[in-house]
Structures are given as structure tokens and as C-alpha cells.
Amino acid sequence: MTKGTYTYEYPRPSVTTDCVIFGFDSDGLAVLLIERGIEPFKGCWAFPGGFMRMDEDAETCARRELEEETGLKADCVEQFGTFTDVNRDPRGRTVTIAHYALVKKSEVKGADDAAQARWFPIDSVPSLAFDHDRILRVALKALKEKIHFEPIGFELLPEVFTMPQLQDLYESILEVKFDRRNFASKMLKLGILTEVNDGTIRKGTRNPIKYSFNPDSYSQMKAKGFRLEF
Amino acid sequence: MTKGTYTYEYPRPSVTTDCVIFGFDSDGLAVLLIERGIEPFKGCWAFPGGFMRMDEDAETCARRELEEETGLKADCVEQFGTFTDVNRDPRGRTVTIAHYALVKKSEVKGADDAAQARWFPIDSVPSLAFDHDRILRVALKALKEKIHFEPIGFELLPEVFTMPQLQDLYESILEVKFDRRNFASKMLKLGILTEVNDGTIRKGTRNPIKYSFNPDSYSQMKAKGFRLEF
DNA sequence: AATATTTTGCGTATATTTTACACATTGAAC
DNA sequence: GTTCAATGTGTAAAATATACGCAAAATATT
């Protein structure tokens, strides 16, 4: 990106993207934050993000910033809102197109590359820079609504997972408790899970059955029209 | 808005808002379009919209442009997506924050003030300027999803309406047919409708009962937590 | 004017879905 | 070894959704 002088007849706001990165493991839902090294809000935690280039669209920008700042490549990146408050950035008028990214925390290695990146459990997120507190609230709301219609949950789990893990995930995101048996039967009835035989013989019921998400069944199901209610 | 010279170190896209205006009457769902008087896309139909000022947020901008170009003041204006394709505007890099506005078509008088504004039934919309075809598709999808959770439908009806009208509205937006009796009982059971006594004595069943939306009951219901499924 | 048709409200029977819940098995904890 | 917690399976009851009949009167038809 070339620094120089760009002149316009009317003033223009800066356009940035921000990325709310959701991860999930046995400790529940978490978000990846970056500690700001410079003013404003130096030392505060914030979402990775940055200025949109003239030759990239918003999602491309969000993915680029995500990788630059955290080393992560997410499969699922989606915009959920644009934040335009006049005073949201003390440096000057800036609008940000906010995205969420869903990553398999189990596969994340590079997150530690960026020394100042850290996962925070969703209920232990500190006060954030700019209007990022508000952005996080909206992101969570968007995630909750989205999981009712699309199986985004599977983006957050390892390739192979168990029914209790899947239930934990839904319960973490939706902040409700389900009956174990009803959840399992409902989920299996959807027909988008494939039982994984990893060679080991399941002796007791104590060690759970392993499943993987079946994208083919899902596309079929989607084509027919369906409901994914929880 | 002052014209002049504004210089930045990095290039910036223009930021606009666009407004997909939905209206409803006995002919079904419709959108209000503006015929473009200048290039590019001169003579094409498009959504009202324009450049965001430095002292207004996106929703304020959308409302302002809406009023300037159509004379309408909508109660309900909400952003549903930001469109950022690199080549979406031939004049230069522009991102637009798209909103939908819901207006009571029965109360619209000023729409004809703008000579080149016209309502189009939703299934007779011509090919639009810029990427507005795509924006309309996304707007309709957003509307469909939204009506499942919030009673936005009432923004589109007159203050006083009948059950068949309400059903027509839901059927127009969701593109499905409901059983008349089941729809009515479901809707009444929500407890957000108030029967309106307009003095006239209802003799036959042929002339329908008049209702109005009760915002108080709705807020109560919302506070308790609820589902608005159709 | 007489008759047929459509529109509206109300209520009920049936199918489907959701919810609540008990027990047997076995790994883990002590 | 004994206790505890985690997992899989199935069933009965409750709630909800669906399908549909009937009567009254305005409107359309002849």
C-alpha cells in the first residue's frame, strides 16, 4: 500500500474492518484479542483489524488482517454489522465493517506467534478499546441467531467430536441448558452427523461415540428446505 | 456540506448509504425506486441513497437521504448489510451501507413529490442500477428473517388493520400460504393485538374485525422472553 | 329479485413435535 | 473395592401444529 497524497472534493471517513474471532474448547466459548501497542487505547485489548485497501473487499480485508495479526486462517468469516458512530475513533471519523471469524481452537498453533494475542473466555473479556465492547455484544447476538439457521457450530469444533462436546458448544453460545437425551436425538435426526470409527473398540458407554459433520448431507438437506432449530 | 479539498495519506473509498423502502397494500409488497437522472446508469431505477456526511452516522444518513429524495419519514430504518465489491460503482471505489425502511404505504402522500419516484410490486422490479439487484435480494432475505423475531410487519400496515390484511402481509413477505384459521388463532394468542371498536356495529362476519398493534403488550412479552414463529 | 359464491369467524379432531424422565453400563476418583 | 460421574438408549405425557367443517352475511351472478 503506497503512502502519498490523495485529494478529494468532500471529506471521507476511513474504512476499516474488525474481526471478532470465536474459538471453543472444553473451557467454553472464547474470543481472541490483541493488546494494542500504540495510542489510542495503548495497552487495551481490541479485535484485530485495520484499514481496507482499495483493491480488496471487506471480507478479503478482514481475512488479511486476521492472518497478519494472529497468523490464523479462518474458514468462516462473515460480516455482521457496520459501526459508524461519529466519535467511535478519537483519531478521526472511521467506520468499521465488523466480521466474526470461527476457528477450530484445537488446530490453532500460530495464535501465540503474535506475542500480544490472547484468548479470553467469553465471560472474562476485559473492557475493550474503541466501541469494541458494543461490537462484541452485537457479534454474540449475531452468532446466536446464526446458529439457529446454519450449522456454524461445526466450524468451531475439531473435525471429530463427541455429542457432549457439541452440546457444550450449543449451550455456550446460546447460554441455555438442554436435556442431554433430547439434544442428541434431535441432532442425530437431522442426518448431518457421521459416526466416526477410529479403530478403537467402544467398550463402555463412558467413552463417547465420535462424530464428524457431513457437509454433503447438509447441502442435500439445505436444498430440500429445512429447519435447524434449537 | 462544504466542497473543498481534503487530503489524506492513504486513499479512501467513498461511503454511502442506500435505502430499500418496503411498502405494503392490497396489491402486496412493493419497493420504492428512484429513476436516476444522471450517469452512470442514467434512466435506470435505483434505491435512494447518497454520501454519508462527517457529522452523521449511517442511520441518520439513510433517513436524511430517504426524506430528501422521497419526502418520506420512516419509523423503522435498519442496516442489513454493507456492500464493498471493488467495482460496484464505475465512478470509483465506494462502499455502501444498505438499510431497509418500512413505511405505511397508506399514509404515504409525498411519494409523488419526487416525480421520478415510483412503487414497484416486489415481483415486477426492473433490473436496477449498480449492484442494487443483489442488494434487493439480500434485503428481502433480511426482511424474511427479521419478521420471524420481531413484529416488523406492523410497520407496514395502517394503524388499524384486519386479520386478512395481516395474513396477506405475512404471506407476501414469506412467500408462503397459511391456513386462515390457524394463522388468526396463533396471532391472537400472542396477545399483541387489540380489537378496535370504531363505532360501527359489526353485523355480519363478512366485514372483518379491526385490530391495532399493541406496543405495550409487545414490550411486556419481549421482556419475558418469547418466540414469534410463523 | 332470487340465487350462488365468497369472505369471515369460530371450534374441534388428529398428527406431529417437544418435553420430561429412569435405568444400565463403565471409566474415573478415592 | 467402593463410590461417583458420564454416556447411551427409549417411552409416556404434554404442548403445539395442522387440517378441516360449519354457519352467517356481504357480494356477485343471473
Image (cartoon, coloured by chain):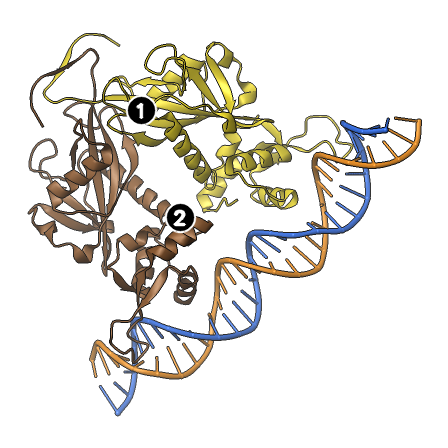
Chain colours: A brown, B yellow, C orange, D blue
SS at circle 2: loop
B78 or B180, which lies in front? B180
Q: Residue at x 16, y 44 (%)?
A: A33
Does A204 appear above or below B97? below
> What is the C-alpha distance between the residues marked 1 and 2?
28 Å
Of the residues shown, which amino acid type is indicated by label 1?
Ala
The residue tagged 1 is B58
Give a yes or no on whether discs 1 and 2 share a subunit: no
Q: Residue at x 54, y 37 (%)?
A: B170
Q: Residue B10 lies in what quarter of the image?
A: top left
Subunit bearing disc 1: B
Residue A210 in the image: x percent, y percent?
Answer: 29, 68
Does A161 appear above or below A84? below
Decide if residue A226 is in sight here: no
Task: Determine crowd level at label 1: few under 14, some 14-19, many 20+ residues with C-alpha closer than 10 A.
Answer: many
Residue A46 in the image: x percent, y percent?
Answer: 16, 39
Q: Residue at x 25, y 17 (%)?
A: B91
Q: Residue A190 lies in what quarter of the image?
A: bottom left
Task: Determine crowd level at label 2: few under 14, some 14-19, many 20+ residues with C-alpha closer than 10 A.
Answer: some
The residue tagged 2 is A149
Q: Residue at x 64, y 42 (%)?
A: B180
Q: In the shown orientation, is residue A176 left or right of residue B12?
A: right
Residue B110 in the image: x percent, y percent?
Answer: 50, 12
Does A197 appear above or below A8? below
Subunit bearing disc 2: A
Decide if residue A191 is in sight here: yes
A148 or B28, which lies in front? B28
Q: In the shown orientation, is residue C6 left or right of residue B10?
A: right
Q: Residue B49 got which mark? A: none
SS at circle 1: helix
